[in-house]
Image (cartoon, rainbow, N blue to C red):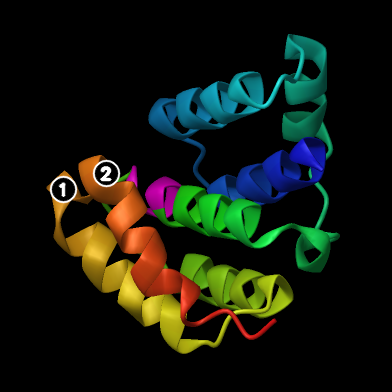
Amino acid sequence: MAKAQLNILVKLAKIDGVLVQDEIRLIKKIGAANGMTNAEIQDCFEHPHDLEGLQELPPDDKYDFLYNVIQLMKIDGRLHQEEIEFCARAVSKLGYDQAVLLELLLKIYGDDRITADKESLKSTIQKYLKD
């Protein structure tokens, strides 16, 4: 499941046509943290897949994935329409109400300190999970 999630993060990073070094580093860090080899991570960069298997994740993993997606969107300092649309599709596939995207964007994008308070944000976000 980690490979599927990393594939989606790569696809999101590439959606604006520019893959910046900070995005690459974050994706590699997430892959390594999930026990993926360098070859598996590289394969995700070369052959990213679409939104598959997200609905099967446990609730905690859904939140972590959604949090990582928003962090990745934030990393280049620009919010692109294509990224928002991609995230909206991911939110639906994860089983969240669409309102969660706005909540996350406001909280994570608007406050640099939110990364230190990830668990507090989790309780707020989980109320949007439909499952």
User: Is residue 129 inside the magenta stretch?
Assistant: no
* Secondary structure of residue under mark 1: helix
Residue 96 placement: quadrant? bottom right
Query: Which amino acid does the dot numbered 2 rest on?
Result: Thr
**Rendered location of residue 20, percent (x, y):** 44, 33
Residue 41: x %, y % from top left: 73, 23
Q: Which residues are magenta?
A: 71-75
Residue occupying image coordinates x 81% and y 13%: 39
120 sits left or right of 64 in the view: left
Q: What residue sits 71% from the left and 46% below the top?
A: 5
Residue 64's tag is: none
- The picture places residue 21, in percent across and down from the top left corner, at 43, 25
- Quarter of the image where the N terminus is located: top right
Query: Do residues under tags 2 and 1 come within 8 Å of each other at their CB atoms?
Result: yes
The front one of 62 and 41 is 62
As displayed, is residue 17 above or below residue 122? above
Kindly identify which residue carries mark 2. Answer: 115
111 vs 29: above or below: below
Outermost top residue: 38
Amino acid marked by disc 1: Asp
Cα gap from disc 2 to disc 1, whole angstroms? 7 Å
Residue 44 higher or lower than 63, as above or below:
above
Identify the image quadrant of residue 10.
top right
Helix, strand or loop for disc 2:
helix
Crowding at label 1, few (<14), some or many (≥20) Cα neighbours within 10 Å? few
Residue 15 seen: no
Disc number placed over residue 112 in the picture, else none: 1
Q: Quadrant of the C terminus?
A: bottom right
| Residue 87 image position (x, y, % from top left) | 55, 69
